[in-house]
Structures are given as C-alpha cells and as structure tokens.
Amino acid sequence: NSGGKHCLALTSDGEVYSWGEGEDGKLGHGNRLSYDRPKLIEALSGVGVVDIACGSAHSACITSQGLVLTWGKGRYGRLGLGDSEDQTRPKMVEALLGYRAIDIACGSGDAQTLCITDDDNVWSWGDGDYGKLGRGGSDGCKIPTKIESLAGLGVVKVECGSQFSVALTRSGAVYTWGKGDYHRLGHGSVDHVRRPKKIATLQGKKIISIATGSLHCVACSDQGEVFTWGDNDEGQLGDGTVSAIPRPRLVTALQGKHIVKVTCGSAHTLALSTSQLNEGCRPPPLPPLEYDLCRDLPPDALHARLVLLHHFSELICPCLAMLPISGELSLSSLKDLLVYSIKEAAFRKVIQTTMVRDKQHGPVIELNRIQVKRSRMKSGGGLAGVDGMKSVFGQMVHKLPLLTQEALSLPHRVWKVKFVGESVDDCGGGYSESIAEMCDELQNGSVPLLIQTPNGRGEAGANRDCFLLDPTLTTVLQMNMFRFLGVLMGIAVRTGSPLSLNLAEPVWRQLSGEVLRPADLTEIDRDYVAGLLCIRDMDDDPKITPQNRHEYIKLALNYRLHEFDEQVKAVRDGMSKVIPVPLLSLFSASELQAMVCGSPDIPLGLLKSVASYKGVEPTSNLVTWFWEVMEEFSNQERSLFLRFVWGRTRLPRTIADFRGRDFVLQVLDKYNPPDHFLPESYTCFFLLKMPRYTCKAVLQEKLKYAIHFCKSIDSDEYARVAIGEPTETTGSEDSDIESVTSHNFFN
C-alpha cells in the first residue's frame, strides 16, 4: 500500500506473502496481528495467484482462473461481498463468478475497489464519496457494479488514489474521476468529477504506464516521456518545486532516460529505465569531512559495510532483552554498531507491549496558573514560590502520586487538566498547554532545576543557549522535582509528543548512560580544562609541587565530570517509571535528545501534509497567503504559532506521531469587516479559525499579533474585547471546546 502500512509480495510460483500492520485482518492470516517479516498467506497457498493489490485497510488478489478474492476491512462494502463485515482471510467475490478478472486496485481511507474483466468492462464497489465509483453520484455499493461509461473502451489498467480513480486504455488514453482538490485529477480545476473523464492534456500521447500516490499521479508514454500532476508538497512531481501541478506536465529531468514504467508511494515517485544512462553512472559523493576515517575507503567497501551493519542490526535487535547492560557485549558497546531506525523500532516495540489503550486520559488534575504570576511578581520575576513549588511544574510535583503506572502507560493524555479560574474543558489542548507551560518554567527562572552553562554566562564558546541540571540542588524535595522532570521526558518518548527543552549535549550523554569526558566539559565550560592545563604547565613553586599539582588536577577534573551524577540519577529514575531506561544505553546523546525533544525546527512540509481546510479551497489566495506567511516566519514565530493553535511548541517527528490529528484551517464569514478581527484557535482540535482577510499583509499582521500577544486559553469571553464600536462576539460554538481567543480590534 502506498501509505506504507502493509505489504503483499507475489512469487513466481503464485504464492502470496504479507507483512506489516495487521489491523482489520488485511494481512489475510486469520487474525489482526502485525508481522515484521513476510509470512505466507496459507489460505492462498496452491491457488495460483497472478495479481495482488493493497489498499490502506484491505487487500485483494486475482487467481490464474480470473477469480477475485478480497480480505481486510469491510466498511462501506469495499470487499464486494455484499456486506460491511471484516474478513481476516481471503474470500471469493461471488458477484464476479462467471467473469475473468485481469486487473484490480484497492483505495485508501474510505476506500473503493476497481476491477477489470476480460469482457472489456470495469467494475467498482465500496465507498462512493466524490463520485469515485464513476457512476455519476456519491452512492456507495457493496457488490461489484459496472462503470457503463468505460464499457468497450479497452481499459487495461486501473489505479486508486485517495478518494479518486484512474483508468488507462489500450490506446493510451487516461481517464480520471473522483475528488478534485490538489488537482489530483489532472483536468486543470479542483472540481469533483463523478464520471470517468479523459485527460485532454495527454491527447496525442500513448500512455503505457500509470501510477497514483495519495494525491498525485504519474504517467509514462511509449516514447519514454514521464508526465506528473497533482499535489507536490514533498517534491513528488519531480519538477524541482513543491507547487501543485493542475495538468499533466513533462518531467524534463527524465527526458532521454528511456523510461518504461512508473510507480508511486504516498508522496514520492519512481521511474524505471531499461537502458544505461548516456552520461554513465555518476560516482557516489565523497563522505563528508567529519567522516575522516571513511574517506579513503572505496565506495563498494562502504556499501558492503552498510549492508553488513543493517543485517547485523536486524539479527541483534530482536534479542536486546537478552543482552547485559554493561560488559564487552552489552547494550552500550553496541550503540554505534546498530542502525538507528532498526534499534529505535525495537525500542518502540518494547514500549508498545506496555501501552494502555482503553482509557481516554489519566487523572483530572487542578492547576492554578493565576498563583504562578502572583508568586513571580512577589519574587521580582524569580522563583514561583519557595523552590518554585507554586509554579505549574511544582504543582505537578505535588500531584505526582496521582500518576499511577496505568496513567503513565497511556499513549496520549497522561492527565486531564482543570485550570483554576479558567473555564477550560480539556480535550487535549489543556494537557498540551500544561506541558508547554512547564517547559517554559524550567527555562525562564520560575523553577530552579536548570542553570545556564558557564559558556552561556560568559557569552563565549559552544552551548551558550543551553541549560544544565543544577548540581547544588540535593534536598529530598528537589530530587523529587528532578524525578518528575524524568517522568516528563519518559512521557515525551512514549507518546511521541516532544518537549521544548534546550539541554546541553553532555546532559543527554549522561541520561543515555554514558560517562562524561574532559571534551564534554569544554563543550559547556571552555575555560575549565584550559585552566587545569595552565596549572599543569606552570613553573614550580614551593607551595606547588609536581605531586600535589597532578593530584589537584585529577581531583578537580573528577569532581566536574561527576558533578551532576545525583541529579542525572534522579531524572533517570523518573524516566524509568514510563519507559525502559536500560535500553537508553542503545542511543547516543543526539538520538536520545531527538526522541525527547524532536527537531528544534518546525518543518512546514510536515505541517502541510496534515493540513485540511474548511470554508475555503486549498488553492485559494487566502490559503496561499497563509502558507507564504508561515514560510516567512522565523523558527521562533513558528513555535509560537504552534503553541497558539495546538498548545505545543514543536511538531511531532513523523506523520504517525500526529495520531490522526489534522491541522484544520477554517475560514468563516461571520467576522465583518474581516480585517478588523484576529484569528482564534481551538487547541484541543488543532483548529485555526480565520476571517476572510482581504490581503496577505493584513493576514500577516493579525496572525503575528495573535501568536505574540494572545496566549491565554479562555472560553469565558473576557479576552474578547472590541475596541471602537461594539460588534457581535465570536463565541465558542461548543461549550466542550477550549479556545485560545484573540482580541477583536479595530484599527
């Protein structure tokens, strides 16, 4: 499946193997289990399969006799069996008995299924939204039904994209139908098309191969030309841009490459050439300068080493639980030998086994943010109360006994927030806001746990903008605070929701189980080791002998290398309540930091990939202006925007970690005049409501104001202040929704 969740493989002997995600029974093994290695589908053994197809939640095949079998999710009748029941084993589509099938395709999401039979007919069944079944309406059906307008046209190939369908005829014509946004149909508009429509731009070209991604298409002609169209946010159309293409356009980079076949992933494209490229194979680039030990190795030797490391990683990672934590063959000794993606997958698998999935959230916890401001005002902007215990972080430390092991094993909201004096019903945004607030407190002086690096205090050297654990904090209460910091880190790893913490690399090195080196001290305090070297090399003095000089240097260095041991131990103790801390020895400092904090950058491509729109077309000027403004924002402003609209300051690392949560941009006409109003957000639902601004400059001004000055979660209307003549307030549409509201104001 182009979405990458599961795979089918067909052997030359007609056997079918499947692996990957097993939800809905789409692997065909009679269960809903997932498999990380190919497994023979025993129900198809000996049947003689000649063609296979994957949808996002179902699968299909054709036998040598032309029979069609389907299995997996049955919703909307996508299996063609006359009902909506799931099937965990392949089952024959009886409605096609008497016909000989020659090609089949499965869709994604609310999916359709297409099939060609040798009597020159195309059949469709399943969900009918946007007319993707090709029969003029949006009605679905649970048994195969002919697409009359394609009868007799000589269709030889069908493909299913996300909410649309494609057919290729023997003469080389391409027909598309279904949902039209993102220009996925190639007709030059975003209109939905409910019956197959020929793509006029390809008239005169004989297309021999077609493929669809999630929202884009590619076609190859008999002259070896490649044409692409549709969504292009990941550069999948091959034109060097990320702008959508409304009609098929020639991929100039592939001219002269003699392409004979094309295929797609969800958002990438591949083209197969059968002849050697005229310019010959380019040599691989030299390793970067920092990989000095590899620079003299020939490319084939580097390739062989990489293959060996991958194979070694795949053999070792399933056995990690059997290895000792320390010693010659230990987790830490394997750290640099195991491929990151493989060892992280093994680590995630261990976490998955302890996940609690039958609860929406953990305990309800009251937090008082009003007292935080009062406490900081009393201390002149310093600690929020004694030891910072009146901060949100400190309040959560008091509530730590409420976080049971069951709550700490949840995949999402470990607690539900009730902000005292703020009318918020936490559907996720309040929880995210509380974590973002605690990260701010740890770094703005409200809580005493973190201190600036010596390089930062001296404005010299590396890591000037980073923090260390304060080694002077040793009381029982302070150690509990460090433990709760570890709990937060463990939650970030388990849930895939990163923390906005800027800790220096030596801290991450110790948290991963490594011992600090003198070079690590220089990273945070450039003058310390240099000072010790001066003492070592200074002239003899009656009070400074070679013996006590070296003893002093040894003791001073040892003290600084182990200065943070107790605090690190407390943090790791807190992490151990949520994740398997011994396995952290597998990861380097940078790898652990990425798991806890994600990327410090806000990749707009990732945000665009999960964006959907209400009340506005994706190709409208307003949407274009919005993304242009986001491109022009600094990374700090993008972080502020995320906090405004989602209660977070960083994006998850992957689409999977969004857990199905789309970023929704909704444009409403109730704001009148629109340029007098600011946007508002609903953080629980990752929703931004925006007036229909008249130009990009106004949109930029209002959005900047909102993210910088409107940070309060509020549903009591007190933050909605009209300046000038009174206007109708734009209240929440649902009392269960918390909203980050911004002031309505007039210029």
Image (spheres, helix red, strand yellow):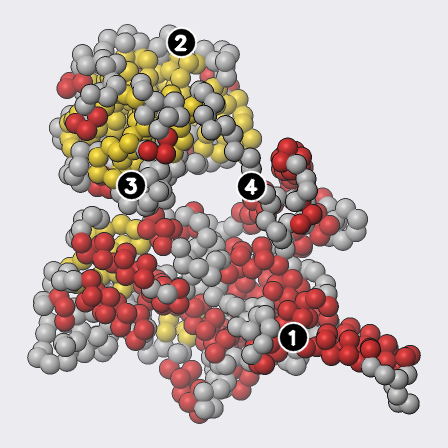
Quarter holding residue 624: bottom left
Question: How far is disc 4 from disc 3 in space, using C-alphas?
Answer: 31 Å
Mark 4 touches mark 3? (CB < 8 Å): no
Residue neighbourhood size for the residue with mark 4, other residues' Cα within 10 Å, grouped as few (<14), some (14–19), many (≥20) = few
At 62% from the left edge and 36% from the top edge, which residue is drawn? 299
Instruction: Name the residue carrying label 4.
Output: 285
Residue at horizontal 40 percent and vertical 26 percent from the top: 257
Looking at the image, residue 466 sits to the left or right of residue 160; the answer is right
Identity of the residue drawn at 70% across and 77% down: 528
Q: CA distance from mark 3 to mark 2?
A: 36 Å
Sequence-first disc among 4 and 2: 2
Nearer to the camera, 175 or 632: 632
Dot in front, 4 or 1: 4
Q: Amino acid at mark 3?
A: Asp
Q: Which mark is residue 64?
A: 2
Left or right: 747, with 429 as reference point: left
Q: How many numbered tags mark residues here? A: 4
Judging depth in this view, the residue of 546 and 28 nearest the camera is: 546
The answer to whether residue 276 is above or below residue 682 is above
Q: Earlier in the sequence, mark 4 or mark 3?
A: 3
Which of the image's four quarters has the C terminus? bottom left
Residue 525 is labelled as 1
Residue wearing tag 3: 231
For marks 1 and 3 on the same chain, the one whose residue lies earlier in the sequence: 3
Q: How many residues crowd mark 2 within 10 Å: few (<14), some (14–19), many (20+)?
A: some
What amino acid does circle 4 point to? Answer: Pro
Residue at disc 2, secondary structure: loop
Q: Position of residue 444 (x, y in %)?
A: 48, 78
Q: Is residue 202 visible?
A: yes
